Amino acid sequence: MILLAQIINLVAQGYIWVIIISVLLSYFLDPFHPVRQGVNNLVRPLLDPIRRVVPTVGMFDFSPIVLIILVQVVSNVLVSFLVALS
């Protein structure tokens, strides 16, 4: 169970880095650049529902921050549950 908890934690941290990379690429690359589209294809399925709920404030989009927090919360809950089982 501990190994599974570590894997979940590692995947969650990796996905958080993908979200951060997606945000950074949005500042520097064209929206139709293949690298940006590839990263966005990983992030967009979870980011779009959050964007429908969380409004943008001026030109700032806080949905990636909300997604990072949700990924951390879900990861921590799953890891705590698995550690409690073992």
Image (cartoon, rainbow, N blue to C red):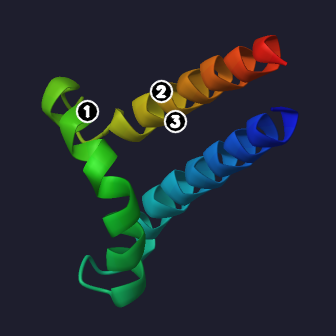
Please say if the residues under marks 2 and 3 sit with CB atoms less than 8 Å apart.
yes
Going by the numbered disc 3, the residue's amino acid type is Ile
Please state if 56 lies on the left or on the right of 9 as rendered: left
Please say if the residues under marks 1 and 2 sit with CB atoms less than 8 Å apart.
yes
SS class, disc 3: helix
Measuring 65% from the left and 50% from the top, which residue is drawn there?
11
SS class, disc 1: helix
Going by the numbered disc 2, the residue's amino acid type is Leu
- Answer few, some or many: residues within 10 Å of disc 2's Cα (few below 14, many 20 plus, some between 14 and 19): few
Residue annotated with mark 1:
50
- Answer few, some or many: residues within 10 Å of disc 1's Cα (few below 14, many 20 plus, some between 14 and 19): some
SS class, disc 2: helix
Q: Give how far apart the Cα atoms at labels 2 and 3 are.
A: 5 Å
Residue annotated with mark 3:
68
Rendered location of residue 83, percent (x, y): 81, 19
Is 31 drawn above or below residue 73 in the view shown?
below
Please state if 37 lies on the left or on the right of 25 as rendered: left
On residue 70, which mark appears? Answer: 2
Q: Give how far apart the Cα atoms at labels 1 and 3 are.
A: 11 Å
Going by the numbered disc 1, the residue's amino acid type is Ile
Measuring 42% from the left and 70% from the top, which residue is drawn there?
39
